[in-house]
């Protein structure tokens, strides 16, 4: 008999986002003229940049020719793309990565979810709070989260509050953890971890033999030249960190 994965029943977001939707709709019906700032699920608001549109058109044209057609791509990504990432995102910042250390996928949302599958079920998870919900939900589905309280927090996950007092950039936890998710620049706070903070996290991970999953999806928004774009700018991070990027 087919059985459901019981862990899915614990997903608080399954209740939270439809509930936000219902409340927003009710509010808008009651106050149709009120300007509303949405703090629920985010969405992008600007059209594609001309360079992106042009590159997409060019790629489609290329695929329509005998000479330019490509079938299934290599599993870890096209060499030309891996090389561009290696050069522009890493070598330009003094980080020497080998081509086989870079994996191109269909998006960092999927991979920030998929990555937990390579770790054991007993791994203890820590996240800064608030953070991109995908890290939490995928660990809930994998059975690492335990019960959920009324505020949607899971008993088996260590939440480290990001507050004004710590500059929305928390220190490593004092409780034990094996996998730590860091998002810098952070969704949703926008805060960027500075070198000292990242150095503390790398030292913590090495001391506890933990792994940092570092999501730099928004690195292009960093404007202060002093702020790191990559966790690999920190000495020792190569031993303990997996970095995600997004285009
Ligand atoms: C922190 C963070 N990482 C990753 C993603 C998704 O990235 P991609 O578009 O590459 O799947 C998002 C999108 O909301 C995000 O906020």
Image: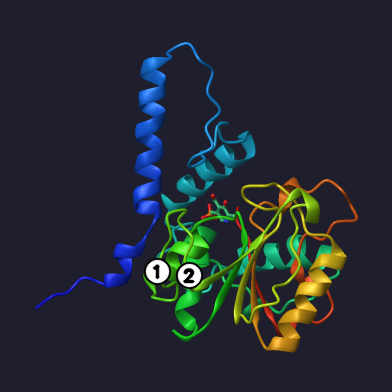
Kindly identify which numbered label has been placed on residue 155.
2
Relative vertical location of residue 154 with respect to residue 64 in this rendering, above or below: below
User: Which residue position is annotated with label 1?
Assistant: 147
Q: Quadrant of the N terminus?
A: bottom left
Q: Where residue 199 sits: x, y (%)?
A: 83, 73
Q: Which residue sits at x=76%, y=54%?
A: 192
Q: From this viewpoint, which residue is outermost toward the right?
A: 226
Determine if residue 215 is in view: no
Q: Where residue 225 sits: x, y (%)?
A: 89, 52
Label 1: few (<14), some (14–19) or many (≥20) C-alpha neighbours in 10 Å: some
Q: Quadrant of residue 201?
A: bottom right
Q: Where residue 4 sits: x, y (%)?
A: 21, 70
State the SS at label 1.
loop
Q: Pointer 2 and pointer 1: residues touching (CB < 8 Å)?
A: yes
The answer to whether 237 appears left or right of 145 in the picture is right
Relative vertical location of residue 53 with respect to residue 204 in this rendering, above or below: above
């Amino acid at each position: 008999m087919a059985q459901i994965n019981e862990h899915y029943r614990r997903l608080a977001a399954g209740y939270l986002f439809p509930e936000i939707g219902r409340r927003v709709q009710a509010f808008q019906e009651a106050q149709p003229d009120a300007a509303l700032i949405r703090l629920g699920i985010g969405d992008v608001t600007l059209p594609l940049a001309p360079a992106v549109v042009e590159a997409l058109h060019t790629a489609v044209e290329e695929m329509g020719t005998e000479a330019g057609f490509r079938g299934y791509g290599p599993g870890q990504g096209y060499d030309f793309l891996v090389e561009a990432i290696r050069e522009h995102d890493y070598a330009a910042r003094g980080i020497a990565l080998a081509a086989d250390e870079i994996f191109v996928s269909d998006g960092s949302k999927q991979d920030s979810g998929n990555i937990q599958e390579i770790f054991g079920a007993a791994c203890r998870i820590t996240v800064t709070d608030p953070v991109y919900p995908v890290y939490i939900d995928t660990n809930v589905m994998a059975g690492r989260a335990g019960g959920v309280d009324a505020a949607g927090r899971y008993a088996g996950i260590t939440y480290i509050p990001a507050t004004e007092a710590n500059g929305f950039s928390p220190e490593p936890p004092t409780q034990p953890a094996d996998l730590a998710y860091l998002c810098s620049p952070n969704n949703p706070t926008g805060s960027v971890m500075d070198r000292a903070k990242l150095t503390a996290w790398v030292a913590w991970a090495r001391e506890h033999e933990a792994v940092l999953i570092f999501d730099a999806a928004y690195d292009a928004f960093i404007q202060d030249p002093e702020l790191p774009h990559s966790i690999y700018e920190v000495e020792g991070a190569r031993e303990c960190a997996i970095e995600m990027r997004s285009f």
